[in-house]
Image (tube, coloured by chain):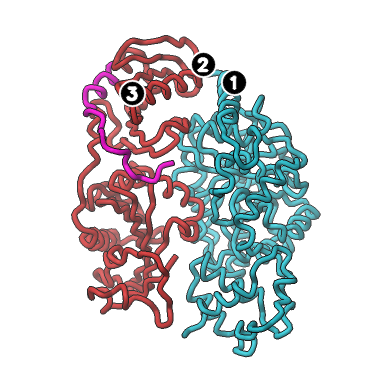
């Protein structure tokens, strides 16, 4: 963690980076994204920034969130700017955190991983939700969290602080295109998630997207797992099939896509796993094979051609 | 899917992984690859009455099926916490199947536990965790990250509200045992206070083959019947085992690190992050270990050579009092650690400001460095003191 002793004046000056050091504090030799710190305003309504802005990077995120750090690193965590705000009269505290992730997909990913679907939507960034004492939202490559102690209340003011921070972080961007791969019919709202590593517990399944379905009354999950090539995807499918060697009723299928297999697992239920070019498309827990095949057919229809560009830089192992 | 099927798979993958390893540094296959994915040794967890597998699961899982498989292998302790984003909820998806067979170790959110937190706030937080875990009780409720300056000093864990909350939770059947976790700079001091005052049934501490200074603490815990669990077994606090000299031998080196804990009679179990089936197989492959081989020792030496010279072990203090000029070596190195590793720059500089100028490292010039002679780990103490002086003085 590094202190950003950002004073009222320094915040508004172009040379804030130079002025931000405490007297006698040496250059730390690392690039610190002062622009993120600047997104934390000095005031918002009755709330005044009551602490220096602290910065954490991937080497010391443990100091701030200890056991949660590992997950953030998987989502391509870059750095964190955090500070506290207090209300002069009530002395209530807001902890503000801006996590800069590798890119917007990872910001979306960690947001969806952390947010409760029961929280109320709020108009902040690309997507945000507010619960009894926390606002979470993501915008561009940033994941923002504002927290008050339980019972802290005053949500409109928390929302106003969130809006000020969102403004400071620039244009919000838009929802990842991958969200559109999953048809909305029967989909649990806002259930699409980005899984950077170890999807389905398979070390080779990285950068996957999944969505939950409740159709009809039967919970199921659909996943799309991208690979570098058709061959790599075929090898991963074969390995996954081997992993499920003892599942019941294993059957080869010729479609949808380039075909694959189906099986029934005691924990996951009915599994249909197929390859579509360089992607694996998998359904877990569907009530029957026809429903699973119909869903996967629709997902495959929506998939754009596999990108020829290098894999996305997101820090996933 | 049957248990046999998955086990067969992970055995095969562990063997395949071993077979494909290039071994320029220390040639050897991954150890005990065959028949690996099961717990082979159980020990009493202190006086809790629980027989715990020697390898236990930390967090890191994303898929409930992985956690279900972990329990199928015989692993019967899961380490979770409020702060582990989404992990309590994930455990809750699987736990009803295994509730009587798995020891759930949970922790309050570290910032919640302060010198002024109330009993009702702690009990309320416990209820939130129970709901997330989909259970009516946890086997052990811990204070998370004691001994960490960020969350406060010893007064934090001396707050009587904590112990009133624990007593109430036990009376209500929501908590069976209590304890604390730490890998902070004051781990030994705070853990000792808890042990001396009979507050902990189980302790979870950062420990690995480099942290020999924790032995007296562990022996005290043993003597009191307190369960002992190791975490951070493969890291020197935050240095990952990504060591160039090991090249493709990372698996064997990780296993050697685990084996060091397993071979110690001071730990009841260890917890390690298990994000996927391959890692479960890799870690369970060393379950049942009771001694280290010469090959394990060589791996540990390789790791130690890479990180040991800059790793000041918690609880060591061998340099304390060694300086003929009265430089408080251990204190200054600890302030340096606050500054560098714990982000407590201001606190560290303030503490350093209290060291009299006459006993600062300016005295080190031309000294024969008795401090370095006293360090059992060969740390370049004088160099570190000079660095500390540059970092910590207001100049």
Q: Which chain carries label 1?
A: B
Residue at left offset 63%, top offset 49%: B233
Q: Chain B is shown in which shade?
A: cyan
Residue at image mark 1: B8
Question: Do the residues indicated by labels 3 and 1 lie within the same chain of the protein?
Answer: no
Q: What stretch is highlighted in magenta?
A: A294-317
- In the picture of the structure, the residue carrying the numbered disc 3 is A230
Q: Distance between the residues labelled 2 and 1?
A: 9 Å
Q: Quadrant of residue B337?
A: bottom right
Residue A243 in sight here: yes
The chain that hosts pointer 2 is A
Element type where label 2 sits in the image:
loop
Is residue A316 highlighted in magenta? yes
Taking depth in this image into account, of B210 and B203 the one nearest to the observer is B210
Residue B151 on the magenta span:
no
Disc 3 to disc 1, how far (Cα)? 27 Å
């Amino acid at each position: 963690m590094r202190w950003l002793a950002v004073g009222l004046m320094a915040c508004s000056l172009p040379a804030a980076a130079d002025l931000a050091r405490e007297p006698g504090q040496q250059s730390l030799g690392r690039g610190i994204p002062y622009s993120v710190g600047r997104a934390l305003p000095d005031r918002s309504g009755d709330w005044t920034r009551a602490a220096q802005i602290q910065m954490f990077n991937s080497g010391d995120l443990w100091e701030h969130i200890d056991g949660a750090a590992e997950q953030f690193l998987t989502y391509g965590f870059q750095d964190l700017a955090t500070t506290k705000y207090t209300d002069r009269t009530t002395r209530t505290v807001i902890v503000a955190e801006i996590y800069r992730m590798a890119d917007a997909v990872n910001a979306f990913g960690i947001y969806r991983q952390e947010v409760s679907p029961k929280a109320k939507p709020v108009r902040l960034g690309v997507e945000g939700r507010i619960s009894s004492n926390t606002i979470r939202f993501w915008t561009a490559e940033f994941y923002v969290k504002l927290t008050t102690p339980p019972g802290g209340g005053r949500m409109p003011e928390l929302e106003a602080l969130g809006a000020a921070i969102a403004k400071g972080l620039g244009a919000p961007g838009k929802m990842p295109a991958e969200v559109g791969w999953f048809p909305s019919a029967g989909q649990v709202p806002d259930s699409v998630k980005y899984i950077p590593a170890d999807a389905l517990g398979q070390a080779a399944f990285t950068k996957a997207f999944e969505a939950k379905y409740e159709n009809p009354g039967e919970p199921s999950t659909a996943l799309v797992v991208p690979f570098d090539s058709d061959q790599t995807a075929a090898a991963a499918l074969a390995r996954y099939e081997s992993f499920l060697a003892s599942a019941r009723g294993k059957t080869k299928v010729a479609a949808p896509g380039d075909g694959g297999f189906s099986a029934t697992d005691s924990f996951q239920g009915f599994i249909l796993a197929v390859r579509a070019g360089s992607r694996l498309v998998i359904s877990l827990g569907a009530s029957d094979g026809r429903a699973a095949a119909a869903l996967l057919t629709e997902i495959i229809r929506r998939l754009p051609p596999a990108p020829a560009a290098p894999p996305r830089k997101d820090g996933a192992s | 899917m049957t248990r046999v099927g998955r086990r067969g798979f992970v055995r095969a993958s562990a063997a395949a992984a071993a077979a494909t390893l290039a071994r320029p540094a220390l040639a050897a296959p991954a150890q005990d690859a065959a028949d690996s994915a099961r717990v082979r040794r159980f020990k009493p967890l202190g006086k809790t009455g629980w027989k715990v597998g020697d390898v236990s699961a930390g967090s890191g899982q994303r898929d409930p099926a992985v956690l279900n498989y972990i329990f199928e292998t015989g692993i019967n302790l899961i380490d979770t916490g409020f702060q582990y984003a989404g992990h309590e909820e994930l455990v809750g998806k699987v736990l009803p199947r295994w509730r009587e067979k798995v020891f759930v170790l949970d922790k309050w959110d570290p910032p919640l536990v302060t010198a002024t937190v109330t009993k009702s706030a702690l009990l309320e937080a416990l209820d939130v965790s129970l709901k997330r875990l989909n259970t009516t009780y946890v086997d052990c409720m811990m204070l998370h990250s004691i001994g960490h300056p960020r969350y406060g000093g010893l007064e934090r864990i001396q707050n009587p509200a904590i112990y009133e909350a624990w007593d109430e939770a036990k009376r209500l059947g929501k908590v069976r045992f209590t304890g604390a976790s730490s890998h902070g700079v004051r781990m030994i001091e705070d853990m000792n206070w808890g042990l001396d005052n009979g507050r902990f049934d189980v302790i979870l501490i950062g420990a690995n083959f480099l942290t020999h200074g924790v032995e007296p603490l562990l022996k005290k815990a043993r003597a009191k019947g307190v369960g002992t669990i190791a975490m951070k077994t493969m890291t020197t606090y935050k240095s990952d085992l990504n060591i160039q000299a090991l090249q493709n031998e990372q698996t064997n080196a990780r296993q050697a690190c685990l084996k060091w804990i397993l071979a110690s009679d001071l730990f009841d179990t260890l917890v390690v992050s298990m994000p996927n089936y391959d890692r479960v197989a890799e870690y369970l492959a060393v379950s049942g270990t009771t001694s280290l081989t010469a090959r394990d020792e060589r791996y540990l030496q390789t790791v130690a050579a890479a990180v040991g010279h800059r790793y000041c072990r918690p609880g060591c203090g061998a340099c304390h009092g060694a300086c003929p000029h009265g430089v408080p070596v251990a204190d200054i190195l600890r302030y340096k650690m606050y500054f560098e590793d714990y982000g407590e720059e201001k606190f560290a500089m303030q503490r350093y400001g209290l060291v009299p100028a006459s006993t600062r490292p300016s005295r080190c010039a031309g000294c024969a460095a008795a401090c370095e002679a006293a360090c059992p780990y060969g740390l370049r103490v004088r160099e570190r003191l000079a660095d500390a002086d540059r970092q910590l003085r207001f100049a």
